[in-house]
Image (cartoon, rainbow, N blue to C red):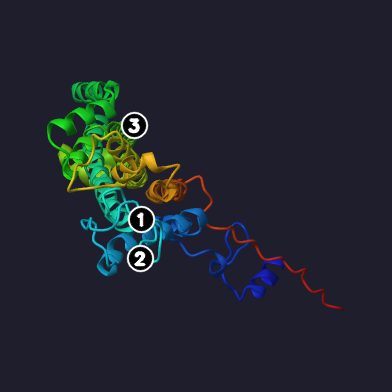
């Protein structure tokens, strides 16, 4: 009798074990939609995305309308902030705003290049080491350990000095010493995934090693790869700034935020706007990328709750029919 009453209350629709009708259950979502929804709900990450997009757009678009070029050194030396030069001029008579805009462009370009190259190398080495194991794993693991014990900044400074300081040389050299953490993380995940049923099925169907790695393993590691690639951008920004700050990074006519900071370090007390202007932009870029990485890590974490559970409707007591 109770089932008849309950069926009548739900319109005759079938119920699941929790007492919910089929229409009351949440609609299934794809993994990508769940990740995107969790990332969009991460307030700090979304604020950081807005900040990074704003900085990038300003660095790319503002030079088209700014009246002073980054190469123009015809202004007075160390002019104080004014309407014409909001952050003053440098010792050689260059507008500081134009220098920050140009430095931001190159810093972002170097960081993205480093992240892409380091991620590519790390994912390929880590995936093959984790899947194949044995001799291949031993060789790649020892190579990774060798690069990890080399002081990266010192080695990068020497190589940049030898091969000149063009921005792409700096990016490639930094990428050579940035792929090892990505390779280790990818290797560990590949070792875990290689024991799963879908990999065994791919082997049984005759798929080769390359096809299994790039078609089955790598797509299932996209979350880990995305998070580590994002964090590699922030690390590359700081690494390039450190090289340029000690005078072994980007060389003229190229520039970067690290080089601009280095050139105006001595003015930190007397003319602080020349130092803290590019320094603040560098800090905002680094923090924004790190917070975006934290948001992506939380979004890809399956332990995070993504959909609020639907509370089952309260069951009404069956109406008693009076005799």
* Residue 86 drawn above or below residue 119: below
For the residues marked 3 and 1, what is the alpha-carbon distance in whole angstroms? 56 Å
Secondary structure, mark 2, is loop
* Residue 268 drawn above or below residue 55: above
Q: Residue at x 32, y 32 (%)?
A: 181
Residue where numbered disc 3 is placed: 188
Corner quadrant of residue 199: top left
Residue 237 coordinates in the image, percent (x, y): 32, 43
Image check: 69 left or right of 189? left
Q: Residue at x 36, y 55 (%)?
A: 79
Mark number displayed over residue 24: none
Quarter in which the N terminus is drawn: bottom right
Out of 164 and 306, give the one closest to the viewer.
Answer: 164
Out of 311 and 181, give the one closest to the viewer.
Answer: 181
Residue where numbered disc 2 is placed: 84
Out of 303 and 157, give the one closest to the viewer.
Answer: 157
Image check: 231 left or right of 322? left
Give the farthest residue toward the left: 163
For the residues marked 1 and 2, what is the alpha-carbon distance in whole angstroms? 10 Å
Residue 156 coordinates in the image, percent (x, y): 23, 31
Mark number displayed over residue 79: 1
């Amino acid at each position: 009798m109770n089932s008849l009453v309950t069926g009548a209350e739900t319109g005759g629709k079938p119920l699941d074990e929790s007492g919910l009708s089929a229409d009351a259950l949440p609609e299934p979502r794809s993994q990508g939609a769940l990740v995107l929804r969790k990332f969009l709900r991460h307030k700090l990450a979304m604020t950081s995305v807005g900040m990074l997009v704003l900085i990038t757009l300003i660095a790319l678009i503002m030079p088209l309308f700014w009246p002073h070029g980054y190469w123009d050194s015809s202004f007075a030396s160390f002019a104080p902030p004014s309407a014409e030069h909001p952050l003053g001029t440098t010792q050689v008579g260059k507008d500081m705003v134009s220098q920050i805009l140009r430095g931001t462009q190159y810093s972002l370009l170097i960081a993205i290049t480093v992240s892409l190259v380091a991620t590519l190398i790390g994912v390929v080495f880590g995936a093959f080491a984790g899947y194949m194991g044995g001799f291949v794993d031993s060789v790649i693991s020892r190579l990774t350990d060798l690069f990890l014990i080399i002081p990266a900044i010192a080695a990068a400074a020497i190589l940049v000095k030898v091969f000149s300081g063009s921005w792409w040389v700096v990016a490639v050299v930094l990428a050579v010493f940035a792929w090892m953490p990505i390779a280790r993380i990818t290797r560990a995940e590949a070792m875990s995934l290689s024991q799963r049923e879908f990999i065994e099925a791919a082997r049984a169907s005759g798929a080769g090693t390359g096809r299994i790695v790039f078609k089955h393993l790598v797509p299932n590691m996209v979350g880990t790869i995305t998070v580590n690639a994002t964090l590699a951008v922030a690390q590359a920004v700081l690494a390039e700034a450190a090289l340029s700050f000690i005078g072994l990074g980007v060389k003229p006519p190229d520039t970067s935020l690290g080089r601009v900071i280095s050139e105006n370090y001595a003015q930190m007390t007397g003319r602080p706007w020349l130092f803290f202007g590019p320094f603040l932009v560098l800090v905002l870029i680094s923090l924004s990328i790190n917070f975006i990485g934290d948001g992506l890590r939380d979004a890809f974490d399956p332990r995070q709750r993504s959909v609020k559970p639907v509370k089952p409707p309260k069951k009404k007591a069956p109406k008693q029919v009076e005799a």
